[in-house]
Image: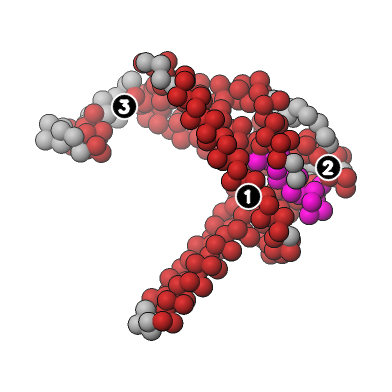
């Protein structure tokens, strides 16, 4: 697994990453402007910050008009749609990496959005299983709370099981994403038992992936902080805008570097790579 290739990938595609960031920033800015500039939110903000609570009461806030409501709804829609789109576009990124294409793929918004929605549904299934595990552990620990040393031992076992299961589920999600990209069938993402089996059988490679992902997070976090310290210190709205753009830019770059690592991880465990059939790229998943 090449960490340097994954790290360089978004820098080699900086213009495309920056264009995505600018589109998202403008979309968010438009709806935030509609929401904030058409309504007096000071009573609510004062209550949240617990400052001047006597001066402003939450009941004093005027009713929300049509313009700020449109802004609020638009903000939620942009956040949800952009999340789905980025997730679905990541499938195309993985395919292009398997094809040894150095540049990021073209955008098919409708298809990317649909792919992202399928991946979101598969992630919900993993979260439900994980929550069920936590609930069971909580019930067991509460039932054995009076057993002293046995309860303490169960706490240690529970923490270990939670960490291991969480890691395997995360790897299984990546396995499902990679199989989705390789097989051209969204149902691959929902085959949780099979995906977890593949992830568990290749846990050493999954551990390597996790280490590289943590390293990416640390490096990109440091770069983001450094760049924001230089440009984000500009006064006024320009400084705020630059900080927002810098935040989204480096988070998105980290995301695409991570997708490069996932594509390499998939090849290591026998998904994609030389066995990848490019003709499945345009399968209709409906």
Cα separation between marks 1 and 3: 49 Å
Residue 65 horizontal/vertical position (percent): 31, 26
Highlighted range, magenta? 258-272
Which quarter of the rendered picture does the N terminus lie within?
top right
Mark number displayed over residue 115: none
- Secondary structure mostly seen in magenta is helix
Residue depicted at x 56% and y 41% = 217
> Contact (CB < 8 A) between labels 2 and 1?
no
Q: Residue under label 1, please give it.
A: 211
Residue 128 horizontal/vertical position (percent): 54, 60
Residue 93 horizontal/vertical position (percent): 72, 36
Q: Earlier in the sequence, mark 2 or mark 1?
A: 1
Q: Residue under label 3, please give it.
A: 65
Image check: 40 left or right of 205? left
Q: Hey, which quadrant is residue 51 in on the image?
A: top left
Answer above or below: position of 176 versus 111. below
Residue depicted at x 32% and y 21% = 38
Q: Residue under label 2, please give it.
A: 280
Residue 154 in view here: yes
Image check: 253 left or right of 246? right
Between label 1 and label 3, give the one nearer the viewer.
1
Determine crowd level at label 3: few under 14, some 14-19, many 20+ residues with C-alpha closer than 10 A.
few
Answer above or below: position of 285 versus 32. below
Image check: 28 left or right of 286? left
């Amino acid at each position: 697994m090449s960490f340097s290739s994954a790290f360089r990938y978004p820098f080699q595609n900086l213009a495309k990453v920056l264009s995505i960031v600018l589109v998202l920033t403008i979309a968010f800015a438009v709806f935030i402007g509609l929401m904030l500039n058409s309504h007096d939110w000071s009573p609510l903000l004062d209550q949240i910050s617990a400052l001047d609570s006597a001066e402003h009461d939450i009941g004093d806030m005027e009713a929300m008009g049509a313009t700020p409501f449109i802004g609020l709804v638009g903000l939620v829609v942009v956040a949800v749609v952009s999340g789905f789109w980025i997730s679905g576009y990541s499938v195309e990124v993985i395919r292009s990496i398997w094809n040894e294409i150095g540049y990021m793929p073209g955008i098919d918004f409708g298809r990317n959005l649909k792919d992202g929605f399928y991946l979101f549904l598969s992630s919900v299934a993993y979260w439900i299983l994980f929550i069920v595990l936590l609930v069971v552990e909580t019930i067991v620990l509460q039932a054995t709370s009076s057993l002293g040393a046995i309860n303490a031992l169960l706490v240690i076992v529970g923490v270990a099981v939670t960490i291991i299961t969480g890691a395997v589920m995360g790897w299984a999600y990546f396995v499902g994403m990679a199989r989705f990209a390789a097989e051209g069938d969204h149902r691959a993402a929902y085959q949780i038992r099979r995906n977890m089996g593949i992830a568990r059988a290749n846990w050493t490679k999954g551990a390597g992936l996790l280490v590289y992902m943590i390293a990416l997070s640390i490096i990109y976090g440091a770069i983001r902080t450094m760049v924001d310290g230089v440009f984000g210190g500009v006064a006024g709205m320009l400084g705020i805008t630059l900080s927002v753009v810098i935040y989204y830019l480096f988070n998105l770059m980290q995301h695409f570097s991570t997708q490069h690592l996932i594509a390499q991880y998939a090849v290591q465990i026998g998904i994609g790579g030389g066995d990848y059939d490019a003709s499945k790229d345009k399968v209709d998943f409906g």
